[in-house]
Image: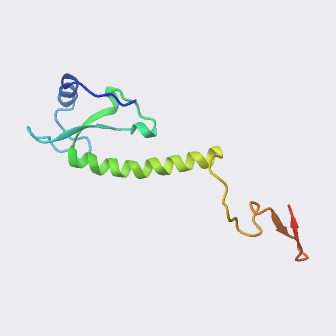
């Protein structure tokens, strides 16, 4: 569950990391937009604790979040396949194990 940080907690996080952007390494200037970034995204099992949060420029954070969305989708597909949650193909390749038919050496097709 994502929680919102108080102003005091955001300031402490900023000062702990000396105002340095976690992604590009540049300094965040006064008045410049910055966001709290999760090193390990929540969707990939990261937690909402201070050790997993870093300050980042808003622009850098948007770029990383877009990349994280791709990686998250891939991880979820991989997990679904591993756990057998993925629906079987509606049109399996003829002769494959998923089709339910097999071809004997004589050329005859039989049910598996």
Near-viewer residue (3 or 81): 3
Q: What colour scheme was applied to this rendering of the protein? A: rainbow
Q: Where the N terminus falls, by quadrant?
A: top left
Q: How many marks?
A: 0
Q: Residue at image x 88%, y 77%?
A: 107
Q: If the image is split into quadrants, where does the C terminus sit? A: bottom right
- Residue 28 in the image: state x and y as whole percent: 14, 40
Using residue 62 as the reference point, say whether residue 105 is left or right of it. Answer: right
Measuring from the top left, give residue 56's x and y in whole percent: 23, 41
From the top left corner, tell me how far across and down residue 11 is, in percent: 17, 27
Name the quadrant containing residue 9: top left
Residue under the point 67% across and 61% down: 90
Front residue of 20 and 100: 100
- Residue 8 position by quadrant: top left
Q: Classify residue 91 as left or right of residue 1.
A: right
Rendered position, 71 above or below 102: above
- Residue sitting at the far left: 30
Furthest residue toward top: 8
- Image check: 32 left or right of 93? left
Q: Could you tell me which residue is drawn at 17 percent across and 32 percent down? A: 18
Residue 47, position as x, y percentages in the image: 40, 30
């Amino acid at each position: 569950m994502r929680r919102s940080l108080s102003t005091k907690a955001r300031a402490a996080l900023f000062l702990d990391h000396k105002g340095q952007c976690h992604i590009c390494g540049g300094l965040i200037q006064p008045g410049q937009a910055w966001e709290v970034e999760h090193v390990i995204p929540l969707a990939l099992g990261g937690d909402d604790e201070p050790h997993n949060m870093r300050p980042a420029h808003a622009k850098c954070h948007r770029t990383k979040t877009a990349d994280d969305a791709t990686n998250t989708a891939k991880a979820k597909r991989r997990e679904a396949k591993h756990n057998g949650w993925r629906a079987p193909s509606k049109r399996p390749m003829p002769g494959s194990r998923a089709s339910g038919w097999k071809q004997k050496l004589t050329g005859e097709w039989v049910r598996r």
